[in-house]
Amino acid sequence: MNALAGFALSLAGFAALALSLERHHADIHGRGSMPSRGAVARLRLAGAVALVLAWGLHIAAQGGPMGTVSWVGTLTASAIAVALGLSYAPRAVRRLLPGVALIGLAGAGAAWLPAG
């Protein structure tokens, strides 16, 4: 469960960071469209928080050294997925972002709840 939640959070984090860039914003909303400063700040913050939460999940599941290594592997896979998604279906990345973030947050919440 932690691996799936970590991947979902990494995917959502990279998608949020990518959508904060003018080029990817224009791919989705049309050429000449610029994201507002507030939207850029919110997307960057959300992306950073999602990546840190994903790291925390990996650390909680596997310990410090191995958790960090598996997190880097997850980052690689999710970055490739977001790059391919933005190359071939940029609007789909925007539509999938809330759902993937929700899956990741639900998995993170379940991972940190006490068992019992």
Image (cartoon, helix red, strand yellow):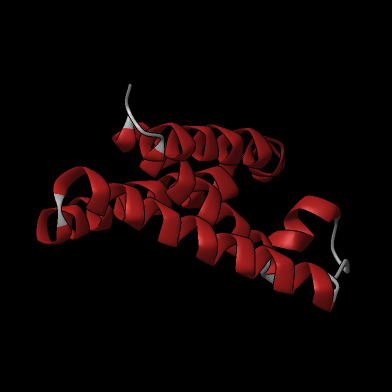
Give the quarter of the figure containing the C terminus: top left
Say whether residue 53 is left or right of residue 92: left
Q: Residue furthest left?
A: 65
Q: Position of residue 73 (x, y in %)?
A: 23, 52
Evaluate whether residue 18 shows in this view. Answer: no
Evaluate whether residue 100 shows in this view. Answer: yes
State the image quarter where residue 93 is shown: top right
Q: Residue at x 33, y 57 (%)?
A: 55
Give the quarter of the figure containing the N terminus: top left
Placement of 96 over or under 39, stated as above or below: above
* Viewer-nearest residue: 11 or 60: 60
State the image quarter where residue 97 is shown: top right
Say whether residue 50 is left or right of residue 7: right
Q: Residue furthest top?
A: 116
Q: Position of residue 69 (x, y in %)?
A: 16, 57
* Viewer-nearest residue: 57 or 13: 57
* Viewer-nearest residue: 1 or 44: 1
Q: Residue at x 67, y 70 (%)?
A: 21
Q: Position of residue 2 (x, y in %)?
A: 32, 36
Placement of 41 over or under 43, stated as above or below: below
Q: Position of residue 76 (x, y in %)?
A: 31, 54
